[in-house]
Image (cartoon, rainbow, N blue to C red):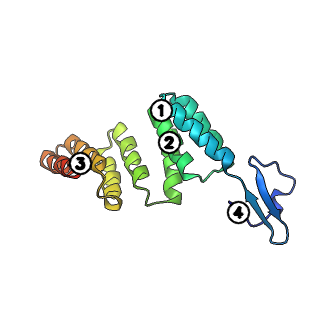
Amino acid sequence: RFVEDLQPFVGETFLTLPIEIDQSKQRLVLSRKAVLQLQQQAQEQALKKKYKIAGNYYRKALTREPDNADALFGYAQMSYYQNNLKEAESSLQKLLDKDPENAIALAYMGKLAAESENWLRATKFIQDAIKIDPKNYDFYLDLGTYLRSQGKFADAEKAWTQAIELDS
């Protein structure tokens, strides 16, 4: 990661390790090793279903790299698993602001909408995800569930059939 303008950082404490300080180019190169280690620790805890601990590791990673897409998604996912839907939505929205074509983030926004039984909003998010990644059978499973919840049984069956075809 490069920081082009060093002036705002004069006298500041860095939460990462500088690899190179090039004053002639006014550039600072920072190490991502600490952030990657935090993300790895978060993933290990998530596999053990220790979502709160995993979320804390992702939060620490985000203090060092606030726009880190993997950490934003990981934190959102851990928040979702802990039923902290506002935190999950906030993190996903930051991710989508940075990358509006992130199909997984859109799908999770659909899951959040479904949690509050906002089936139309959930359907819109999952359809947007499908437009970006039409080969993801999980998206069609979710679409079918959202459509069924709206009483659109024939459309739900079509979505589930598509999921089965993609999984075959």
Q: Which mark is residue 167?
A: 3
Q: Is residue 153 left or right of residue 62?
A: left
Which residue is identified by label 1? 47
- Is 42 situated above or below 121? above
Q: Earlier in the sequence, mark 2 or mark 4?
A: 4
Residue 100 visible in the current orientation: yes
Q: Secondary structure at mark 4?
A: strand
Residue 85 seen in the figure: no
Other residues around mark 3 within 10 Å, as few (<14) / some (14–19) / many (≥20) = few
Mark nearer the viewer, 1 or 4: 1
**Which element type, helix, strand or loop, lies under badge 1?**
helix
Q: Amino acid at mark 3?
A: Asp
Q: Amino acid at mark 1?
A: Leu
Pointer 2: residues within 10 angstroms few (<14), some, or many (20+)?
many
Q: At 16% from the left edge and 47% from the top edge, which residue is drawn?
A: 152
Image coordinates for residue 17, horizontal then vertical, percent: 76, 50
Q: In the drawing, what numbered circle is on residue 2?
A: 4
Mark sitting earlier along the chain (3/1) = 1
